[in-house]
Amino acid sequence: MKRRLIQYAAEIIGLVALHFALLHWLAQRDIVSVIFSTGQHTPRWMIASAVAFLLVRLLVLLFLPGMILSRLVMLWLDARRRNRAPVEEHRH
Amino acid sequence: MNPMPWTKRLAAWAAGLAAFLLPLWFVPHRWCERDSAAWFRGDEQLQAQLASGVERLVTNPLARAHFKTGSAQFNGEWLFGTYLMAGFGFGQTALEHPQWRARHLPLMELCIERILTGDVRAFDREMWRNDPLDTLDRDTGHDHAAYLGYFNLLLSFHRQLDPNSKFAPLNDRITTALVRRVERSPTMLLQSYPAEVYPVDNAAVIASIGPQHRPLVEKWIARCRECYLDSKTGLLIQAVEPHSGAAADSPRGSGTALAAYFLSFADPRLSRDLYRAAQTHLADTVFGFGVVREYPRHCREAGGDIDSGPVILGYSVSATGFLIAGSRIHGDSEEFARLTATAHLFGAPLQRADRREYVTGGPLGNAILFAMLTARRSSP
């Protein structure tokens, strides 16, 4: 359980760090502002970067809290099942 | 260890799903709207930070080439819109915080001077094949409503802030031309471009002549309520036929929300009615985030265009952004919070030193948000 908790924490920190790194990097180059004004002359790599940034941002701001809580709940249920299993096997 | 029975496994998955969905409903929008109360009451620090961000954008050289809409015409409109909205933002913040006048009035004047340059006027000149300022003293059917209406409103607003405005003679010349053209028009509407008439552009025209020509404004307001508002919803028709004034497009969110902002300068009652119509028929929430539809439900939806911005699941980027102003002007703090949460989520504000910029906004998006978030609250 401890190992999985560390793995989850690393994933969360990684996602948040990726979001901040992209935010600063793209802001410096004024790349992501094409997302709401794309036209025929917008280079594809700019559109792709902007879309990727928005997806990461939505993942972090919208879904991360739910992902954390659901993983913790699943982890807790799993741990409870493992703790109960030896007792039930002993009864049988 | 025995395998888990399927009922328990299902229960575990249901618990996991509930744990995933529960925060989605309660956490993200609250996190994103955490600054909304401060924005609503006109927090000095937040406004100063965004003003600094917009100042950096408008004091650096900007040109049509900076925008990438795919159309030289729209790039020109966006260049014009950037200086226009930044000008309103600087004016509004100078009014709300009088101690900023010394800094923000010159910035507003810088925006006006940029709008006067040939490069910024070019989008309108290319459409009409003559210059909007060279044709002020003669009526050849070239109304130039897009350039003159919005620009004159900024000039009138500047004059309200500085009665000795150096732009007063130009403001008077444009006002005289617009009044003459509105009085001459059988629909009381001016053409933005040849054979293109947009009531929202005319809302800016009317707001710009408001202070000196009240009877004409009252007449126009009555005509607008009678002919250019959708009878079912009270939303503003987006485009009309040039000669008959019959609807040429649906009532739409982007035009209604923007007109509610501009008309607040001339007629708070119509502005309030447009805001309420948009709030009632178009505003929605998704996981607590405020979003605004481009088309009311009874209208056939078209895709996004230059007015609406991208339309995603029927919700318009422009309408959502523009309605922020209406909610602040008319004291609707709850809608303001929901809409600013969405602006935070998709705008991606970035704080650097004393400067705040919305990363996805670019020059125009930042200037629009500056004007919308600092829109003047009407007295109750």
Image (spheres, helix red, strand yellow):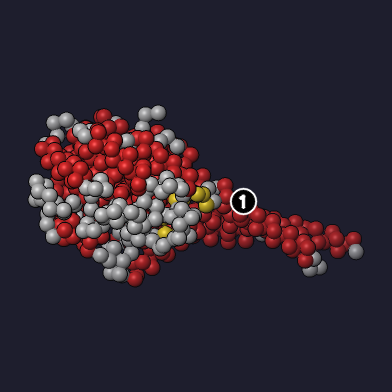
Which picture quadrant has residue B270?
A: top left
User: Eyeballing the image, is A47 above or below B180?
Assistant: below
Residue B172 x/y as whole percent: 13, 38
Q: Tag 1: Cα neighbours inside 10 Å, few (<14), some, or many (≥20)?
A: some
Looking at the image, which residue is at 75% across and 56% down?
A: A80
Q: Which residue carries the number 1 mark?
A: B22
Q: Is residue B281 visible?
A: yes
Q: Disc count in the image?
A: 1
Q: Chain of mark 1?
A: B
What's the amino acid at mark 1?
A: Leu
Report whether B70 appears left or right of B144: right
User: Eyeballing the image, is A27 above or below B327?
Assistant: below
Q: Is residue B108 visible?
A: no
Which picture quadrant has residue B130?
A: bottom left
Report whether B174 appears left or right of B287: left
Quadrant of the image for the C terminus of chain B?
top left
Which picture quadrant has residue A22?
A: bottom left
Residue B104 x/y as whole percent: 22, 37
Quadrant of the image for the N terminus of chain B?
bottom right
Looking at the image, which residue is at 43% across and 47% down?
A: B231
Looking at the image, which residue is at 57% across and 50% down?
A: B25
Looking at the image, which residue is at 51% across and 49% down?
A: B285
Residue B262 x/y as whole percent: 30, 42
Q: Which residue is nearer to you in this view: A71 or B155? A: B155
Residue B61 x/y as whole percent: 18, 54
User: Eyeballing the image, is B203 above or below B128?
Assistant: above
- Tag 1 secondary structure: helix
